[in-house]
Amino acid sequence: MLRVGVLVSGGGTNLQAVLDAIDSGKIRGAAVEVVISNNPGAYALERARSRGIEAVCLSPKSFDSREKFNEALLEKTDEYNLDLIVLAGFLVTIPAAMIQKYRNRIINIHPSLIPSFCGVGYYGLKVHEAALKRGVKLTGATVHFVDEGMDSGPIILQKAVEVLPGDTPEILQRRVMEEAEWKILPEAIDRIANGAV
Ligand code: GAR
């Protein structure tokens, strides 16, 4: 059984998609052992708690320095003996020590077709604002391994989504989630759990 930890900052709809996929058997051989958030108000923590999954908040604000926070984050993930760390809307830079220790065992979901609209400053709604501003007709989502760069690690899965006339960033974000993110994130976890990546 692949022991998975999910790191979140916000609403946690991707976390929900993963939990639902485990329940429905779309993800085979994996269990979410812990959900960790930097944000005490993250609804994702509620989603975890209501499923009986351990929900932990580690806020950088409650540490004297970023180094101390980074150490605590690594200690916490180590505590759960995780095989895979899933960044599902986690808006905190992953400490270098964690990337080294968990090489090829940290994956991230990003709401665009990398290498478009990714890197520093591209997260959440900003990604969709940029896509609409550029006038692309196709966007999508990407699941990739996390390396030292920003959104630069090896790509595992991508799915394209159409941009439609009249789209606002919010409408496009929702379509990208529904048609791409909530599908390819569970699929990537299933593939990793079953040796297909
Ligand atoms: C998702 O759209 C995810 O792709 C994005 O944040 C959102 C989190 O939503 N991640 C990034 O932009 C990372 N660069 P959720 O909390 O409802 O899953």
Image (cartoon, rainbow, N blue to C red):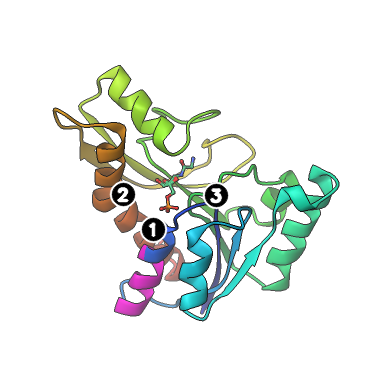
* Residue labelled 3 has its Cβ within 8 Å of some atom of ligand 1: yes
Is residue 93 visible in the rendered image? The answer is yes
Q: Quadrant of the C terminus?
A: bottom left
Q: Which residue is mark 3?
A: 90
Residue 57, image quadrant: bottom right
Q: Position of residue 20 (x, y in %)?
A: 34, 71
Q: Nearer the viewer, residue 93 or 193?
A: 93
Sequence-wise first label, 3 or 1? 1
- Residue 116 against residue 156 in the figure, above or below: above
Residue at the image point whose x is 34% and y is 43% from the top: 141
- Residue 141 against residue 87 in the figure, above or below: above
Q: Nearer the viewer, residue 181 or 166?
A: 166
Residue at the image point whose x is 45% and y is 64% from the top: 192
What's the residue type where badge 3 is placed?
A: Phe
Q: Residues within 10 Å of mark 3 (few under 14, many from 20)?
A: many
Q: Is 49 placed left or right of 155 in the picture?
A: right
Sequence-wise first label, 1 or 2? 1
Q: Which residue is mark 1?
A: 13
Q: Residues within 10 Å of mark 1 (few under 14, many from 20)?
A: some
* Residue bounds of the magenta highlight: 17-24
Residue at the image point whose x is 44% and y is 58% from the top: 12
SS state under label 3: loop
What's the residue type where badge 1 is placed?
A: Thr
State the predominant SS element of the stretch in magenta: helix
* Residue labelled 1 has its Cβ within 8 Å of some atom of ligand 1: yes
